[in-house]
Amino acid sequence: MTLPRPPKRQTLRAIALTTLSLTVALYPTSAQASLFQGETLDAVANGLSWVVLVIVPVVGISVFWLVHILPEKVAEKKKHPQAKAIQCLCLLSLVFGGLLWPIAWLWAYSKPVLHKLAYGTDVDESHGHEVKPLDETERLRLRVAELETQLSRKGAA
């Protein structure tokens, strides 16, 4: 059995030099927690607290609401026949914290098969094309204008 040889003097010197340089490099110096000091630090902290307490919740609620009305907008754009029900589900999803939102999203993108079987089409043609009925005075004005044009034609002939 042989004994291990002692390390050479140059190897010991390299190890000592490496250890010393790492110790000096990693030795903590005075650290600054902020770029600001004194009154400037207080003013920056005050501004940041206002942003965190006021602006972030308002933006968060707005984004939450905008995301929750996306299925409704998709249903209106695709003229989905059950768009009003999808809108109702989106509102319920707002109340229940977003749990129903994936269902509304899937429903807005689904094809209404039963509606197609019943009505022969999978889109609702009445979306956005509601015809406002004319009241009686408007109809009478149109009829009088039509009769006047007929009389003017007969008088010219």
Image (cartoon, grey):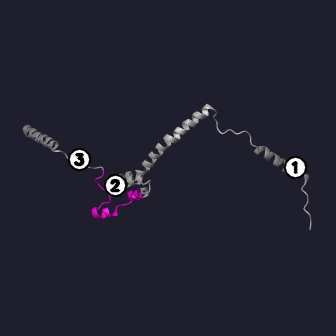
Residue drawn at point x = 37 percent, y = 55 percent: 89
- Give the number of the disc on residue 132: 3
The picture quadrant where one finds residue 5 is bottom right
Disc 1 and disc 2 in contact, CB within 8 angstroms = no
SS at badge 2: helix
Is residue 24 magenta-colored? no
Q: Is residue 4 above or below residue 97?
A: below
Q: Is residue 28 above or below residue 95?
A: above
Q: CA distance from mark 1 to mark 2?
A: 80 Å
Give coordinates of residue 98: x percent, y percent.
Answer: 44, 54
The magenta region covers 103-127
Q: CA distance from mark 2 to mark 3?
A: 20 Å
Mark 2: which amino acid? Ala
- Of tags 3 and 1, which is closer to the observer? 1
Give coordinates of residue 66: x percent, y percent.
Answer: 43, 48
Quadrant for the N terminus in the image:
bottom right
Disc 3 and disc 1 in contact, CB within 8 angstroms = no
Mark 3: which amino acid? Lys
Q: Foreground residue, 39 or 114?
A: 39
Q: Is residue 106 left or right of residue 42?
A: left
Q: Which residue is mark 2?
A: 83
Q: Is residue 25 left or right of residue 13?
A: left
Q: Earlier in the sequence, mark 2 or mark 3?
A: 2
Q: Earlier in the sequence, mark 3 or mark 1?
A: 1
Mark 1: which amino acid? Arg
Give coordinates of residue 134: x percent, y percent.
Answer: 19, 45
- Give the number of the disc on residue 134: none
Q: Which residue is mark 1?
A: 13
